Image: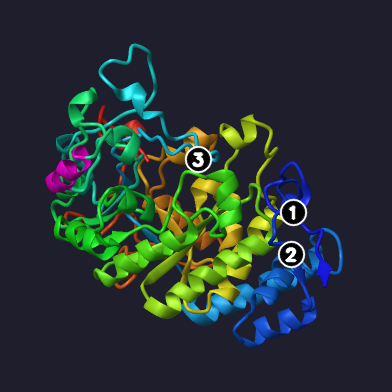
Amino acid sequence: MRESAAASGGRSVSESGADFDFDVVPETDQSFENALSKARAGDRLTVDDGIELITTGTDRRGIDPVRKERVLEAADRRRAEVVGEDVTFVANLNNNVTTACNTGCLFCNYKDTAHQFETAFEGEHAGFTKTPAESRSIVEDALERGIYEVTSVSGLHPAFALNDEHREILASHDDPARAVDYKPPESYETDPGTYVEQLRAMSVGGVHLHSMTPEEAQHARRGTDWSYEDVYRRLREAGLDSAPGTAAEILVDEVRDVICPGKIGTDEWVAALEGAIAAGLDVTATMMYGHVENAAHRVRHLKVLRDLQDRTGGITEFVPLSFVHEHTPLYERGVVDGGATDAEDELLVAVSRLFLDNVENVQSSWVKFGDAKALKLLNCGANDFMGTVLSEEITTRAGGTYGEFRSFADYVEMVTAIGRRPVERSTDYRTRRAIDPDDPPHGPRLGPRADGTPILDPRSSAPGAAGADD
């Protein structure tokens, strides 16, 4: 077998994660040419095929620029065959409830240790917790702007429980703080309410509510024998419309043991999304790459997602998330000294398009990549261009610098510049509206209160108009 010395992703302390003595390494008996031939023919790729493509061959060191372009070309052709020339985007708002979290993931600078939010804490912190009433007000304001999707991904606040019944169960444990990471709401300066109360508050005016990651769903069932399907059914009754497949990071447990040992494992993540789909919800799927993992881990992750989609058919889109490292514990502790390279980003998107033959939509994130690279990735296999966001906090707190808002006019200008058609879409991709670049002004029309009025940058509007954090 041949072992690749190609870029491992993340520019960690050692190439291919060798310092962590990983069992999964980028070795294959396949050749790059055979793998590329299969990809061009539309044949289903094996993990070995994916490794050859994402490394541009395990028979040489580094990423071969000529081979890379051949992979990108194959992926762009596949994108055109599967979804055509449309570039889609959504009018959305990020409203996250709290930064309080005790999980301790080493890639994250979004959370604030939960004890800082307690009434007895005398120090200062930059975190926040919103009440259900505050969340409702934020969403109502966004609806007036034409927004029709609300995305909410929050820290695992110890006072958070699914509902009142769940709070009673958690409180009945001996030493609940230690046993099930629960403290009652009165221990904190601000009561976040329950998950059901927050979702009901945000599910107003016909908005599409996209919330409750697998990690949050686990938090909403901790200390019980409830199934994920049961939990997601109760959340759906409260107004949840779809679930984000974030908290995935890399779905290989030896990597998770390094970067997020306090999080659920791969099998639990998969079980949660299967429960959400069984409850009648669409889901998305993500990968956060570019830290300690190697190329083989990335392809193994794609295989987990493809298998899940084969079983359920519930994944509407795949979202690659390039690790933003600057203000994270992984970087500050010297575990990594950078993120993925441009070539790695391009190959990750391209191989995702070729490998995930049962997932139609692949996203390019301007928040993670910036405008220029995000546009380039639309020619590497991606077809979706994220959303207006209005406010973005998770990536920004980790060191991201690419902004927190995109107007429809921005989208139209950027998408037409690369010769593609801008298309407004619903969260589930089932409703679409092509936008005529020659018929300004450009604003959302698919929302319950959207009339085509342009969305203003919240930083240039009245105080409190944005009101949301991601």
**Callouts 3 and 1 close, C-beta under 8 Å:** no
Q: Where is the N terminus found, in terms of image quarters?
A: bottom right
Pick the front one: 310 or 164: 164
Left/right placement of residue 359 relative to residue 13 reads left
- Sequence-wise, the earlier of marks 3 and 1 is 1
How far across and how far down the image is residue 45, in percent? 63, 80
**Callouts 2 and 1 close, C-beta under 8 Å:** yes
Pick the front one: 376 or 297: 297
23 relative to 304, above or below = above
Residues at marks 2 and 1, CA–CA distance in whole angstroms = 8 Å
Mark identifier at residue 363: none
Please, what secondary structure does the residue beneath circle 3 have?
loop
Which residues lie in the magenta part? 163-172
Q: Name the residue under label 3.
A: 105
- Name the residue located 43 percent from the left edge and 75 percent from the top edge: 309
Main secondary structure found in the magenta portion: helix
Looking at the rendered structure, the kind of residue marked 3 is: Cys
How far across and how far down the image is residue 427, in percent? 32, 63
How far across and how far down the image is residue 193, in percent? 18, 38
- Disc 3 crowd rating (10 Å Cα; few below 14, some 14-19, many 20+) is many
Please, what secondary structure does the residue beneath circle 1 have?
helix
Mark identifier at residue 16: 1
Looking at the rendered structure, the kind of residue marked 2 is: Pro
Q: Mark 2 points at which residue?
A: 26
Residues at marks 3 and 2, CA–CA distance in whole angstroms = 25 Å
Color encoding of the figure: rainbow
- Name the residue located 54 percent from the left edge and 40 percent from the top edge: 107
- Sequence-wise, the earlier of marks 2 and 1 is 1
- Disc 1 crowd rating (10 Å Cα; few below 14, some 14-19, many 20+) is many
Please, what secondary structure does the residue beneath circle 2 have?
loop
Pick the front one: 419 or 188: 188
Q: Where is the C terminus found, in terms of image quarters?
A: top left
